[in-house]
Amino acid sequence: MSLERDRDDEHGFSLFGQDEPPHEEVAQEGAPLTAEEEGRSFFSDLEPAPRRHRRLGSLKSCLVLIVVAALVVAGAVAAFTFGKDKIDALMAPPPDYDGPGTGSVLFEVKQGDTTTEIARHLKAQGVVKSVDAFSEAAKDDADAQDIQVGFYQLKKQLPAADALEVLVDPANLVQASVTIPEGLRVSDILPRLAKATDIPLARYKKAVKDAKGIGLPSYAKGNAEGYLFPATYAFPPNAGATKVLATMVDRWRQAADEADLEGAAKKLGYTPGQLMIVASLVESEANRDQDRGKVARVIYNRLETNATDKLLQIDATVNYALGRDLGLGLTTEDLQVDSPYNTRKYPGLPPTPIEAPGDEAIAAAADPTPGDWIYYVTVNLDTGETRFTKDYDQFLSWKNNDLAKFCAGSDRC
């Protein structure tokens, strides 16, 4: 027996049937798969799809990649373009006008306005094209922080730098400037105001009677005499007569507060209104600042003693009664005028102030210099030298000798 035959017999079957080709295998129905057959069956499940299907899948994957790549590129381009636009916008100068401007605008800078607020108002009135243009111009100009409150005449559609140039120059303020010196009466003040502000005098005469409208204190009793404070004023072009007078009364109130007029009146035993009358008399009588407090003291001493029967004997009050210049000399006939303002005839204070006192006169009335003087006489009208005494004979000596000597060589007496 051959070796091959023995192995076949040992396993009980022939590797090659007699009627089958030697390399063709026929699986018997119901027979278990060999290990090789099991391997081929397992791996057949893992084999890739047919070649046509693989090509379609690959094409789809490529298309997805292409679309994604296109979207990424488009996004990058858009982002770059958006960023570039933003950068260009930031780097570009703000919108501004080029021309010399047109028309006319009355522009107001109000108290407390910042540079940015001024820029907004300018744009709103059509003066500048953008807030940023004016802000940029102001940033480079040190004077932009000192723009003064008031009105300015500007054109519309101005370059921001041109608008700024107008605003930083105080000479361009549109205002009516008027100086009211100390010692003027209401009848003198109103015509000056009318001339300076181009407001008709009739409007001032009407407004001055509106005590509440112009802010007079109650103790003025509706009379503005003495309360239109002497100072230099700059009135805006839109101010009416009432506003102008109210501004002057406000300035008086400032002086009264600084002198503590009401507190001083209580301390001295008078009303604030009476102190204002005294202040007006001091303004009319004192020629030098150092004499104001002494003149005030003489007035109080005369009111409080019987040395002169409480007669103030101030010539300026008589001239006020006559409606004349307060500094004019008086005749015997003048001294007989029957008026409560005639302090040579009627004791005590006149009914109202006789002129507008300034800061120093109000302060003197509120804080008179201590002293027992009853009389005073100015012996030199050029220098204003004034002498004070409680002795009547001394007063007469100075008047009849020193003052007479001065008058002999001067035409001022």
Image (spheres, helix red, strand yellow):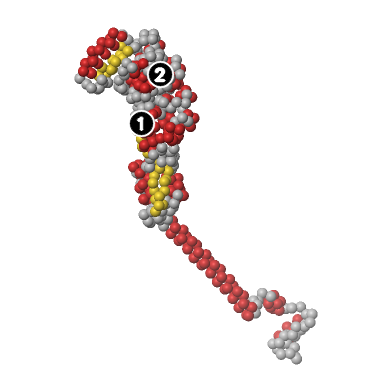
Q: Quadrant of the N terminus?
A: bottom right
Q: Tell me which amino acid carries mark 2.
A: Ser
What's the residue type where badge 1 is placed? Ile
Q: Are marks 1 and 2 in contact (CB under 8 Å)?
A: no
Q: Measured from the top left, where is residue 338 in percent x and y?
A: 40, 17
- Relative to residue 257, is residue 411 drawn left or right? left
Question: Where does the image place residue 146, in percent across and percent down from the top left?
Answer: 37, 41
Under tag 2, what secondary structure? loop
Residue pushed farthest front? 333
The residue depicted at 43 percent of the width and 53 percent of the height is: 129
Closer to us: mark 1 or mark 2?
2
Which label number is shown at residue 375?
Answer: none
Q: Please tell me the numbered disc located at residue 180.
A: 1
Seen at 32% across and 16% down, the residue is 332
- The relative height of residue 220 versus residue 59 in the rendered view (above or below) is above
Q: Nearer the viewer, residue 308 or 136?
A: 308
**Residue 25 percent across, percent down from the top left:** 72, 85
> Element at badge 1?
loop
Quarter of the figure with residue 96:
bottom left
- At 35% from the left and 21% from the top, the residue drawn is 319
